[in-house]
Image (spheres, rainbow, N blue to C red):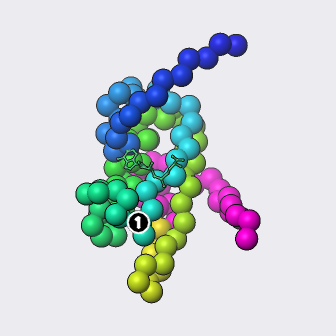
Amino acid sequence: METKHKVIFGNCMSMIELADNAVNLIVTSPPYFNAPFDYKGLFKNYGQYLNVLKKMAKEAYRVLQGGRIFVLNIDDMLVDGQKYPIIADSIKIFQNVGFRYRDEIVWKKPD
Ligand SMILES: C[S@@+](CC[C@H](N)C(=O)[O-])C[C@H]1O[C@@H](n2cnc3c(N)ncnc32)[C@H](O)[C@@H]1O
């Protein structure tokens, strides 16, 4: 079967290129909270970081077809001796925009 592919250089917080229910699967590895310098102006603190995830989750819920899956590759982060509960906060954020929590997969990288 022939498939078509289109690469869009866009913003996950405002996916204006995509219609509602246009997507079958989303897999993403969002920016790391401990590396704000890699994403100039995206977030200055944890609240702003969670707000980025919130906007992405809301847009993802709009563009994903009902019953489809969003795979979020994310982990808790230790910054200046403080552990940020990014996994727990993301699950809540995604649930609050309408997603159901399905499962956690632990990715054990080689030592
Ligand atoms: C942790 S990296 C993941 C990289 C990816 N796994 C790869 O192999 O290219 C986070 C990515 O999010 C992108 N990014 C940052 N802000 C974004 C936004 N508003 N919309 C979409 N992507 C964004 C960054 O450019 C970066 O490539």
Q: Nearer the viewer, residue 57 or 31?
A: 31
Q: Is residue 71 above or below residue 83?
A: above
Range drawn in magenta: 87-111
Q: Is residue 59 above or below residue 96?
A: above
**What amino acid type is highlighted by mark number 1?**
Ala
Q: Is residue 15 above or below residue 30?
A: above
Q: Is residue 38 above or below residue 47?
A: above
Residue 76 lies, in percent from the top left, at: 52, 71
Toward the right, the furthest residue is 110
Residue 52 lies, in percent from the top left, at: 34, 55
Task: Name the residue: 74% across, 65% down.
Answer: 110
Question: In the figure, residue 4 lies in which quadrant?
Answer: top right
Q: Is residue 33 magenta?
A: no
Q: Quadrant of the N terminus?
A: top right
Label 1, ligand 1: CB separation under 8 Å: yes
Residue 104 lies, in percent from the top left, at: 65, 59
Task: Name the residue: 43% across, 34% down.
Answer: 63
Q: Which residue is mark 1?
A: 35
Question: In the figure, residue 68 lies in which quadrant?
Answer: top right
Prevailing SS of the magenta stretch: loop
Mark 1 secondary-structure assignment: loop
**Is 35 on the left or on the right of 29, as rendered?**
left
Question: In the figure, residue 82 lies in which quadrant?
Answer: bottom left
Q: Is residue 98 magenta?
A: yes
Residue 32 lies, in percent from the top left, at: 45, 62
